[in-house]
Amino acid sequence: MTKIDLAAIRNTLAVEIETITANIQSEQNNLHVNSEPNPDQLDLAETCARQSIALDWLAKLEQRLGQVTVAMKRLDEGLYGICEKCGDVINPARLEAMPHAIRCVACQERLEHVR
């Protein structure tokens, strides 16, 4: 099994937190941009559609930020790379592909099938 480079993982997670935080701020700023002073129905519909898409994207960004933050916390606590459900070691290839993973593939699949 490949050894996990925790310093590289910490750096990857820190950069991702910074990037996601900046994207969230940008999206929040875009939501507060006002349109024309006297919009017609089409302008209102377009604004509503854009805001709906932006809110969906914002929710996804916030969810991802939460995942990455949890992974960073687990790294700080010495629990990184250990499945939060079963306690087994998470495959390093999975962690390389998804540094924010906190569950092994088997536990993640079981969780997704329950939903």
Image: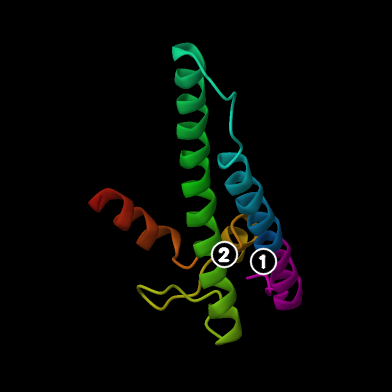
Residue 13's label in the rendered image is 1
Could you tell me which residue is drawn at 52 percent across and 41 percent down? Answer: 57
Callout 2 touching callout 1 (CB < 8 Å): yes
Furthest residue toward left: 114
Circle 2 residue? 68
Amino acid at pointer 2: Val
* Front position in the image: 105 or 35: 35
Rendered position, 74 above or below 42: below
Image x and y of residue 73, in percent:
55, 79
Mark 2: few/some/many CA within 10 Å (<14, 14-19, 20+): many
Q: Position of residue 94 (x, y in %)?
A: 57, 59
At which x and y percent is residue 87? 40, 78
Please name the amino acid that badge 1 sits on. Answer: Leu
Residues rendered magenta in the picture? 1-15
Marks 2 and 1, how far apart in space?
Answer: 6 Å
Is 2 contained in the magenta span?
yes
In the picture shown, does residue 19 fall above or below 74? above
Give me the residue at 67% from left, 66% from top. 13
Q: Where is residue 10? Give x, y as percent.
A: 70, 73
Mark closest to the chain's N terminus, 2 or 1: 1
Is 53 rendered above or below residue 63?
Answer: above
Farthest residue in the front direction?
Answer: 38
- Label 1 packing within 10 angstroms: few (<14), some (14-19), many (20+): many
Magenta stretch contains residue 109: no
Residue at position x 52%, y 18% in the image = 39
The rendered magenta stretch, by its main secondary structure, is classed as helix
* Viewer-proximal residue among 50 and 106: 50
Position of residue 17 in the picture relative to residue 81 (left or right): right
Q: Tag 2's secondary structure? A: helix
Which disc, if any, is residue 106? none
Please tell me whether mark 1 sits on a helix, a strand or a loop: helix
